Image (tube, helix red, strand yellow):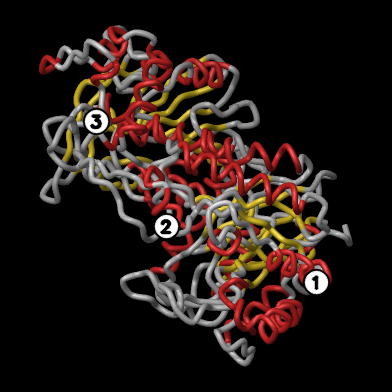
Amino acid sequence: MADKHFLHGADYNPEQWMKHKAAVWQEDMRRAKEAGINELSVGIFSWAFLEPEDGVYDFTWLDEVMDLLAANGMKAILATPSGSRPPWMAEKYPSVLRMDNERKPYVYGARHNACYSSPDFRRKVTEINTRLAQRYANHPALYMWHVSNEYNYECHCPRCQKAFQAWLKERYGTIDELNDSWWNTFWSHRFSSFAQVESPTTPSFLGEWESPNHNLAWRRFCSDHLADFFQLECEPLRKYTPNIPVTANLMHTFPGIDYFELGRRMDVVSWDNYPRWKNDERDRDISEWTGFRHDLMRGTGGQKPFLMMESCPGAVNWDDVNTLPPPGTVLYQSLQAIAHGSDSVQYFQFRAGRGGSEQFHGSVLPPDGSTDNRAFREVCEVSDALCRIAPVCGSRTRNRVALVYDWHARWALDYAWTAHRFHQKYEETVQSHHAALCRAGYGVDLIDQKSDLTPYRAVIAPMVFLLREGFAEKLTAFAEAGGLVYLSYMSGYVDEEDLRFITQPPLEALTGVRTDELDAWDKGHENHFCWQGREWPIHQVAQLCSLRGAEALAVYERQFYKGMPVLTRNRVGDGVCYTLQARVDTDCLTHVLGGLLREGGIPPLVEHLPEGVTATARYDEDGQQYLFLLNTNREAAQVALPKGYRSLMDGRETNGPVMLDAFSVTVFAAL
């Protein structure tokens, strides 16, 4: 236990200080150790220095940096440089440039704009990754590979069109199968060969942009194509450094990539966390959103501990309004990450650059390297806290409530011509359910439709509009075996290919209800339902259903569907399935979900949490529980602990009410 420690580090760009390295690099090592930093991520945007011209490599400067890290007892998370290639590459190999959806080629600039179909880019990436892996395979500082940076992908060039067509042929086999799967008889859009299929032109009107099936297939291809490129990047790393773990930093709910599928290819998932703190009552909502994203990222890695690869020790510089976080915020956001399963606190950036678009982004050190500033002091405070809670490192969650977030369901809703077109609020709806569960005192695991359900006692699945193959059967088996299932409106509308069902919808037997109609409102409509003595407002969406074996627990009180079911229960084998047929706010969901889970014999981590306080728990391999209480209020709050605990922050033992400091995270070990 004493040897455990969290990663505490930052993105480091020593190449930006090459002309000043004699004065800067050694000073940076001293400052990092002074701040309690034990890791630096290097090489992320270094391609122009590693390969200043085609085939001419210079690793001597990186050798020096890696040696400095080792000499100072620090770890290196070494990046592959594909996130931003140098200008000479675009000049010599124009194929590396992407093409937009209007079929116009990019010019060199910015970052993340390389074409992953380009044979030149794939070759150059393989070459430099191989050289990095071979050179540093046995270096004592090498701790982990950081593959690229904040992957994204969408390119419409001719090579990507051919790759898309090959992907379609692999998926569908014949063009007739594709036409049937996409319902292409509509508007006489039946293709006679795969070569006729091009990428959608959304949002322009140059070509195909209205077919939801076509758009869904393109989104799936882009995600798979990126995952294939990730595998390409990893091949030399895993060949020459098989014992060094591989990660790639994700971007929470980024819509273009199925992060569950990408996460399944990583050894460790990491992500970049940038809450937009406002220093007022809005920070409670921001904290809930951040907790949701932490849990989602942990879920993409199979619930293993993840890494918070980036966070800001001050104000960011890219928001429309860059609000300065008040004192204590860096500590809160750091411990919040640990509370939700992170084994690291890392910052962007270590020393700020003098120029470029990130020159005013928050950093551990300003360009002059001085430490007489609040950011540095707060990083030292985080280091002290991480040392105090070191026994938590490596522990995992054991949550019994799963919440489904599925990129394929989201994509289908994004392109669905129904309800609030282009504004279906899938992400917001799942997050609202997450916030409700946390407010009710539950720890939550985020999963997708392919995840294993056996560790859980309850599965909460809002807006699973598209049912991936086998998911309905898996949910039904889960309920029959004694599990609690909850489904919301707009669930089970289409199959894996985004086609409506012509036989009994797969969820009907599970829910015991038949979906009849869907009503979407503007701000002028209102409705409500009554449950357990309270009246609950309904917002924007009301689904009308008929009972087919379920019982109505609550009904609509207004509109022409007054008296129709809105909250239903269906007994299924040894378990139960609930449905909520309308969109409600988080307060209502807290009351409903908390009540249903308690009725189902699933207790929360902590009962009767005050408003603005949530709880999470991690468990080590011996079963030791570490309880985190997060107070998002700007004033102190009191919580009654369920049993005896010892605070890891100050060592005090307690078996009753505890006072939580304002906007704080407190960590306890169960006695």
Q: Which mark is residue 111?
A: 2
* Along the line of sight, the residue nearer the viewer: 132 or 144: 132
**Residue 225 picture location, percent across and down:** 45, 33
Mark 2 and mark 1 in contact (Cβ < 8 Å)? no
* Alpha carbons under labels 3 and 1: distance apart: 52 Å
Q: Which residue is painted at 58% across and 35% down in the image?
A: 231
Residue 630 location, x and y as percent?
Answer: 58, 63
Q: Nearer the viewer, residue 393 or 373?
A: 373
Q: Secondary structure at mark 1?
A: loop
* Residue appearing at x 43%, y 17% in the figure: 510
Residue 408 seen by the camera? yes
Q: Nearer the viewer, mark 1 or mark 2?
A: 2
Horizontally, residue 577 falls left or right of residue 387, namely left
Whichever of callouts 3 and 1 sits on the residue coming sooner in the sequence is 3
How many residues crowd mark 2 within 10 Å: few (<14), some (14–19), many (20+)?
few
The tag earlier along the polypeptide, 3 or 2, is 2
User: Which amino acid type is shown beneath numbered disc 3?
Assistant: Gln
Front in this rendered view, residue 540 or 474: 474
| Residue 606 seen by the camera | no
Crowd band around label 3 with a 10 angstrom C-alpha radius: few (<14), some (14–19), many (20+): many
Q: Quadrant of the C terminus?
A: bottom right
Q: Is residue 160 above or below residue 10?
A: above
Q: Rounded to the nearest whole Å, what is the CA distance between mark 1 and mark 2?
A: 50 Å
Q: Quadrant of the N terminus?
A: bottom right
Secondary structure at numbered mark 2: loop
| Circle on res. 652 | 1
Q: Residue furthest right?
A: 2
